[in-house]
Image: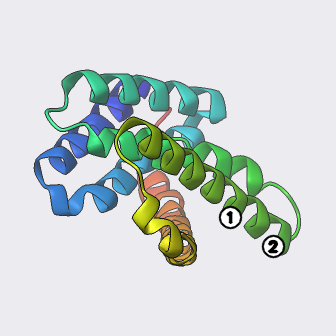
Amino acid sequence: MGALFSALAVVILYFASVWPTGQPGLAAAASMFVAAMVIESGPVPGVFVFVVSSALAMLLLPNRSAAILYISFFGFYPIVKSFIERLRGTVLQWALKLAVFNISLTVVWFILRELFFDFGSFAPHIILIYIGGNAVFALFDYGFTKVIRFYINRIRRDFGGLSK
């Protein structure tokens, strides 16, 4: 099942690599396979799906920007989300989720700045990037939760659990 979910994630990431305008959405969609593995078998197999699909995406995709989006946030977020949502308190959960997102955004920001070009002209706009990014992340998390619930309540229920 892990191999199947890894392969499906890579297929979705392939579509993201050849359809540039859909990269963020398709990278987010590929993360559903990691979430499904976490639901079916737990977080450790979910980590394996994330690692395998990330490695294959970096090796096979013609355009690696979708793979970088997946590796830098979308791929590991379902695993982190599963741990965070076990905690009590909605405020604590949201604080941790936003912290994870902002740490990922900051790491990507510094890597891009060091590797590719100076973002000096963007410096005044960095606050807007973080505000907009956090708003989009909140919408993503809400929608991702709905998709996970759909998976649990419809797909998993109708198929009797995929891991059996």
Mark 1, secondary structure of its residue: helix
Q: Which residue is mark 2?
A: 90
* Image position of 62 (left or right of 47): left
Judge whether residue 44 can be spotted in this image.
yes
Q: Nearer the viewer, residue 114 or 134?
A: 114
**Figure check: 115 above or below 108:** above
Q: Nearer the viewer, residue 119 or 151?
A: 119
Image spot of residue 30 (x, y percent): 35, 47
Image spot of residue 65 (x, y percent): 28, 43
Under mark 1, the amino acid is: Leu
| CA separation in Å, label 1 and label 2 | 12 Å
Judge whether residue 161 can be spotted in this image.
no
Image spot of residue 139 (x, y percent): 51, 76
* Image position of 25 (left or right of 142): left
Q: Nearer the viewer, residue 13 or 162?
A: 13
Q: Residue at x 59, y 52 (%)?
A: 106
Q: Residues within 10 Å of mark 1 (few under 14, many from 20)?
A: some
Q: Which residue is mark 1?
A: 98
Mark 2, secondary structure of its residue: helix
Under mark 2, the amino acid is: Thr
Q: Residue at x 88, y 64 (%)?
A: 88
Sequence-wise first label, 1 or 2: 2
